[in-house]
Amino acid sequence: MTRIVYVNGDYVPEDQAKVSVFDRGFLFADGVYEVTSVLEGKILDFDGHARRLTRSLNELDMAAPVTMDELLDIHRELMARNDLQEGMIYLQVTRGADADRDFAFPDPVKVPSTLVLFTQAKSIAESPAAKKGLKVISIEDQRWARRDIKTVQLLYPSMGKMMAKAAGCDDAWMVEDGHVTEGTSNNAYIVKDGKIITRHLSNDILHGITRAAVLRFAKEAQMVVEERAFTIDEAKDADEAFITSASTFVMPIVEIDGASLGDGTPGAVAMRLREIYLDESRKTAI
Ligand code: PMP
């Protein structure tokens, strides 16, 4: 079955979908994105992702191409046309295609933003990686200073994934001034003496939608949560560690820079949170 993608109001086969070479997403990485997960044909936490998208657009003075209600309809139509039961929906908004390459933002009335969405069918709830746990390396965080905006400037995270791969690991945790910011495409957590520790929100990290939900569920389950920066040394000495993101949910980390955490298998807190997250998200999926 040919995948049907959405481009600026049209649903087209993926090999017929086109965006201009003058699109600012292509020329300047002048765009933002969201990834939402789909389980049993329903979207998880659409409102959270729509809220963050609105915030990203506002921070960059970029016009929303459609209303958030229309965006939900597009998600549903795309799911139906691709018969998506489980996987992800990727969406990207850019500042559109100006008449020429110009650093200055174009007039949004003359140049409409570009909106693209596509589905990615994938088994995500039943994850062999979650049973085994991931190995991460630490790398210096060399990204720009507005990591709270979900832009498509993903070159450094891509490089980080390649560095991890070269080291025989699954991912990288980025470190600034000795403190962990986040994973290349996820938020980072450690567990010490039963306490869940994760970096506080600021411009230094993406405000993960999964992070917000997981911290809420953890507090509801009477777990102790501390939102503060932690060092990479503290992480290597932790009882357990994990990451969260819309597409991996809660994923245990079993090794950091070659140092095994606990007994080297997924920790109990991470496994429990994964279970709670999946149960609760299924209940509120739309
Ligand atoms: N941090 C970064 C840098 C990310 O790219 C992502 C995933 N897009 C996250 C955190 C997790 O965010 P979410 O839970 O909303 O997927």
Image: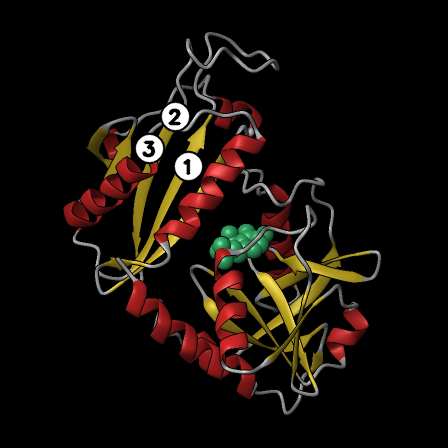
Per the image, label 3 sits on a secondary structure element best described as: loop
Ligand 1 is within 8 Å of the C-beta of the residue at disc 1: no
Task: Specify few, some or many for label 1: CA neighbours under 10 Å numbering under 14, 14-19, or 20 or more.
Answer: some
For the residues labelled 2 and 1, say whether their Cβ atoms are less than 8 Å apart: yes
Residue 45 visible somewhere in the drawing? yes
Q: Is residue 225 left or right of residue 79?
A: right
Of mark 1 and mark 3, the one earlier in the sequence is 3
Q: Amino acid at mark 1?
A: Gln
**Depth check, front residue: 134 or 34:** 34
Splitting the image into 4 quarters, where does residue 60 fall? Answer: top right
Q: CA distance from mark 2 to mark 1?
A: 8 Å
Q: Is residue 195 left or right of residue 44?
A: right
**Residue holding disc 3:** 67
The residue lying at 81 percent from left, 73 percent from top is 233
Mark number, residue 114: 2
Mark 1 to mark 3: distance in Å?
14 Å
Give amino acid for label 2.
Answer: Thr
Q: Are marks 2 and 3 in contact (CB under 8 Å)?
A: no
Q: Amino acid at mark 3?
A: Thr
Q: Which residue is mark 1?
A: 92
In primary-sequence order, the first of circles 2 and 1 is: 1
| Position of 168 relative to 265 (above/below) | above
How far apart are the two marked residues, 2 and 3, measured between alpha carbons? 14 Å
Q: Nearer the viewer, mark 2 or mark 3?
A: 3
